[in-house]
Image (cartoon, grey):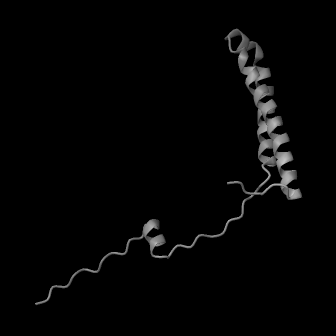
Amino acid sequence: MSEEQPAAKKRTDPTSQLARGELVHAEVKPLDLSGIPSVITGIVIWAIAFVVLMLFRNQLKDDGLDWWIWVPVAGFGLGLIGLWYCKRRWAAIQRGDRPAVED
């Protein structure tokens, strides 16, 4: 009598599928190389946070948390510096003075 061995189960986890060559990675292009829209979004969020905190200024002052108002001011200012940097970098990439991808 010959005993039949059960067929080995095929592993379906992504690592095994990748090792067998069953998974193919799609080429995905980057959405934004300049970073400018992301920085502008951050600046707008910091500005909104400042306005909201100004609405609660008296309560923050009573609780000793009036320094919170300076946090979005700093974020807004740093965002402006970031916007200047991103615009300058993107202009250099467009001119060909700088590679789009850095190591």
Q: Return the residue found at the far bottom.
A: 1
Q: Quadrant of residue 69?
A: top right
Q: Position of residue 100 (x, y in %)?
A: 77, 57
Q: Is 37 drawn above or below residue 46 in the view shown?
A: below
In the picture, measured across the screen, residue 64 lies left or right of residue 44, that is left
Q: Return the residue found at the far left.
A: 1
Which one is nearer the viewer's eye here, 58 or 75?
A: 75
Q: At 78% from the left edge and 49% from the top edge, which residue is drawn?
A: 35
Q: Return the residue found at the far front.
A: 97
In the picture, measured across the screen, residue 9 lies left or right of residue 94, that is left
Which one is nearer the viewer's eye here, 44 or 22?
A: 22
Quarter of the image that includes the N terminus: bottom left
Q: How many marks?
A: 0
Q: Is 70 drawn above or below residue 94 in the view shown?
A: above
Q: Position of residue 17 (x, y in %)?
A: 46, 72
Which one is nearer the viewer's eye here, 86 or 52?
A: 86
Q: Is 100 drawn above or below residue 17 in the view shown?
A: above
Q: Position of residue 66 (x, y in %)?
A: 73, 15
Q: At 76% from the left edge and 13% from the top edge, which residue is drawn?
A: 58
In the picture, measured across the screen, residue 82 lies left or right of residue 2, that is right
Q: Position of residue 93 (x, y in %)?
A: 83, 55
Q: Quadrant of residue 96?
A: bottom right
Q: Quadrant of residue 51?
A: top right
Quarter of the image that includes the C terminus: bottom right
In the picture, measured across the screen, residue 20 lies left or right of residue 50, that is left
Which one is nearer the viewer's eye here, 103 or 87?
A: 103
Q: Is 85 drawn above or below residue 3 in the view shown?
A: above
